[in-house]
Amino acid sequence: MNGGRIPATFAGSAVVVALAIVFWLPPEGGFYPVCPIHALTGTLCPGCGGTRALHALLHGRVSVALHFNSLITIAALPAVAFAILQCVSLWRVGSFRAVNPPPALRIAACILVATFWIARNVVSV
């Protein structure tokens, strides 16, 4: 049976609703929560500016999105490709594909995020 389709469809629907909210509600309106790391330390975390970047991307303003958060902006392309592959898998097989990246890729991603975190705070000082 295709019991995985209902949770997968729910997850996909939740993503579409979240993207619609980010598209229609500008981040400057006070609707979104404040970053706790920035509030406590005054430094920018790797996700700071991500909502503004996503909002700009959804409106086709790539250069503005890069200004707000280049990591989120650059990661959006592989994220969209991954989502499309998962939708194709859901359509053909009836469930999402299992994702298990190799340890080296996980470590590289952590190093990339940490380097971005440090660099954006050193450059902005």
Image (cartoon, rainbow, N blue to C red):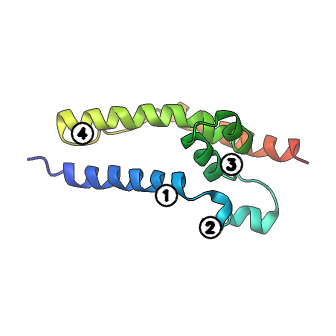
* Numbered badge on residue 90: 4
Of labels 4 and 3, earlier in sequence is 3
Of labels 3 and 1, earlier in sequence is 1
Out of 83 and 119, give the one closest to the viewer. Answer: 83
Up-down relation of residue 25 to residue 68 (above or below): below
* Numbered badge on residue 46: 3
Say what amino acid the circle numbered 3 marks: Pro
View extreme (left): residue? 1
In this rendering, which labeled residue sits more in front, label 1 or label 2?
Answer: 1
User: Residue 43 at x, y = what percent?
Assistant: 80, 57
The answer to whether the residue labelled 4 contacts the one labelled 1, judged by CB atoms less than 8 Å apart, is: no
On the rendered structure, is 94 left or right of 66?
left
* Residue 116 position by quadrant: top right
Confirm whether residue 110 shows in the render.
no
Say what amino acid the circle numbered 1 marks: Ile
The residue beneath circle 2 is 33
Say what amino acid the circle numbered 2 marks: Pro
Of labels 1 and 2, earlier in sequence is 1
The answer to whether the residue labelled 2 contacts the one labelled 3, judged by CB atoms less than 8 Å apart, is: no
Residue at x 69% of width, y 66% of height: 36
